[in-house]
């Protein structure tokens, strides 16, 4: 459990909060390139770390991410005209470039230099690894590069990125990613897995009380779930959890996956799912390599708007399976096909994490022996946020190369995590040349 004060500290990311400041030290993926598909395309509204922003791609292809409201009279720039290397407010015509400079002020006298005094809060952006990144922290602490994660290093044809919107605090979503014990229950399917010769792969299901171990490293920590296997030895699922919110999920074959969560505000988050391979191109039809009911999914979503209670709104992908329809829960299939009766691994996760409410009351939990990774992640985030309050910068934010790590899924005689990582050293680290 957490104290009420710690639960507030770790879940609140608005400007000026300790955790908000910690997130603002990292490059953060926030926009999918499909949201801004071409130069001068329509702008979109996003909210990140409690800040309402507008994102647009200018005539040169440069992405600008800046405050959502015009500094003149606070009109919404979403309605603006994206034209000739700038976004023009349609209320009185002020125009801003991707760096937030006011480059035209047609309603002021020509001799006025007022425009040079007006600047919109704009954040640096990068487009790399199949996502658009933003840095929202102080300029003097801006990391030179986004983290060198393997999904960013492979060719575009070898990865697939999905972005979705989720209606709960970011921490709930990411805690589901680093809770290996739940796969034996929540994601249990009673159907055969086509990737495994049509056999239900039950190696991880033999032992439903895994022993969990955590090893910290420069970019976060590895945590292994060790399960006894019928034939002897151990089945290990080793997840890499990397600051602030990346989880590389173990898989026994390529493609592999990574999840990432960024706070929208304290009650909502964006979730990114990365699937990538180093073995040729990713099949274009993801269904061909993901078993029914499993995998990256969910498959039914649309691009639309989410309206917040404060009257503002964002543009993002919304999921058809959601809490209002109980994620299409089918009680009959729950008896015969899967543990939950809900289709899709991420949807099963969402039913649990959104179902806790916007912010889980962690003062009332009773954590057990399988929750060590959740505890380690909370401790690490809280410690880094507190350290930053004392001007100790987070190491990993400025060490992109520390992120060249992989998850692991093996059966091995080793019973301790250290020896497992040593034995499979070449498989858990990303080589200099990826392909
Ligand atoms: S409010 Fe934007 S130009 Fe007046
Ligand atoms: Fe899960």
Image: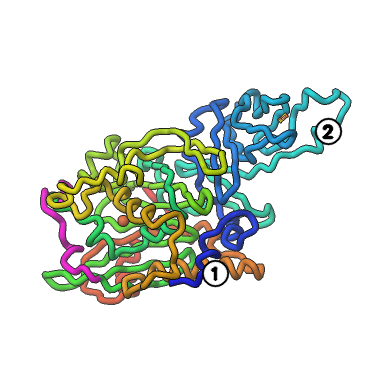
The quadrant holding residue 124 is top right
x and y, in percent, of residue 321 in the image = 32, 42
Q: Is residue 305 left or right of residue 349?
A: right
Q: Is 23 inside the magenta-drawn segment? A: no
Q: Quadrant of ligand 1?
A: top right
Q: CA distance from mark 1 to mark 2?
A: 45 Å
Residue at x 80% of width, y 32% of height:
115
Can residue 353 be seen here? The reply is yes
Asked which quadrant contains residue 363, the reply is: bottom left
Label 1: few (<14), some (14–19) or many (≥20) C-alpha neighbours in 10 Å: few
Q: Is residue 200 above or below residue 40?
A: below
Q: Which residues are magenta?
A: 193-209
Magenta-colored segment: predominant secondary structure? loop
Does the residue tagged 1 have its C-beta within 8 Å of any atom of ligand 2? no
Read off the residue under disc 1.
5
Q: Are marks 1 and 2 in contact (CB under 8 Å)?
A: no
Tell me the residue that label 2 is attached to: 114
Q: Quadrant of the N terminus?
A: bottom left
> Residue drawn at (27%, 56%), measured in percent from left and top?
251
Q: Position of residue 366 (x, y in %)?
A: 36, 72
Identify the mark at residue 222; answer none if there is no mark: none
Please state the horizontal and vertical placement of residue 89, each as a whole percent of the image.
67, 28
N-terminal label among 1 and 2:
1
Q: Indicate the secondary structure of the residue bearing disc 1.
A: helix
Depth order, front residue of 263/246: 263
| Pointer 2 local density, CA inside 10 Å: few below 14, some 14–19, many at least 20 | few
The picture places residue 379, in percent across and down from the top left corner, at 48, 71
């Amino acid at each position: 459990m957490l104290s009420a004060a710690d639960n507030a500290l770790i879940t609140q990311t608005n400007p000026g909060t300790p955790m908000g400041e910690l997130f603002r030290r990292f490059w953060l993926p926030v926009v999918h390139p499909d949201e801004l598909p071409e130069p001068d395309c329509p702008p979109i509204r996003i909210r990140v770390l409690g800040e309402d922003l507008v994102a647009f791609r200018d005539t040169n292809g440069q992405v600008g991410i800046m405050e959502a409201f015009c500094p003149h009279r606070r009109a919404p720039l979403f309605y603006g005209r994206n034209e000739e290397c700038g976004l023009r407010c349609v209320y009185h015509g002020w125009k801003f470039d991707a760096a937030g400079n006011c480059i035209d002020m047609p309603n002021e006298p020509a001799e006025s230099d007022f425009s040079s005094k007006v600047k919109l809060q704009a954040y640096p952006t990068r487009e790399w690894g199949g996502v658009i990144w933003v840095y929202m922290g102080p300029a003097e602490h801006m990391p030179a590069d986004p983290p060198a994660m393997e999904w960013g290093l492979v060719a575009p044809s070898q990865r697939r990125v999905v972005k979705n919107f989720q209606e709960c605090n970011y921490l709930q979503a990411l805690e589901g990613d680093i809770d290996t014990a739940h796969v034996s229950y929540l994601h249990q399917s009673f159907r055969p897995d086509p990737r495994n010769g049509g056999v239900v792969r039950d190696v991880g299901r033999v032992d439903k009380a895994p022993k969990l171990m955590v090893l910290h490293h420069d970019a976060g920590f590895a945590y292994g779930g060790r399960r006894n296997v019928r034939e002897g030895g151990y089945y290990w699922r080793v997840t890499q959890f990397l600051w602030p919110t990346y989880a590389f999920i173990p898989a026994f074959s390529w493609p592999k996956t990574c999840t990432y969560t960024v706070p929208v505000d304290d009650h909502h988050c964006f979730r990114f799912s990365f699937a990538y391979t180093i073995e040729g191109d990713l099949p274009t039809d993801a269904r061909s390599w993901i078993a029914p009911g499993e995998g990256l999914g969910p498959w039914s979503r649309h691009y639309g708007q989410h309206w917040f209670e404060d009257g503002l709104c964002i543009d993002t992908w919304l999921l058809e399976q959601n809490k209002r329809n109980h994620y299409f829960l089918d009680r009959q299939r729950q008896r015969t096909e899967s543990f939950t009766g809900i289709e899709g691994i991420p949807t099963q996760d969402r039913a649990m994490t959104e179902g806790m409410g916007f912010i889980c009351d962690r003062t009332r939990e009773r954590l057990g022996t399988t929750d060590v990774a959740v505890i380690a992640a909370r401790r690490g985030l809280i410690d880094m946020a507190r350290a930053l309050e004392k001007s100790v910068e987070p190491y990993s934010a400025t060490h992109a190369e520390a992120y060249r790590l992989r998850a692991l899924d093996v059966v091995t005689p080793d019973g301790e995590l250290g020896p497992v990582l040593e034995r499979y050293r070449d498989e858990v680290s990303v080589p200099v040349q990826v392909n």
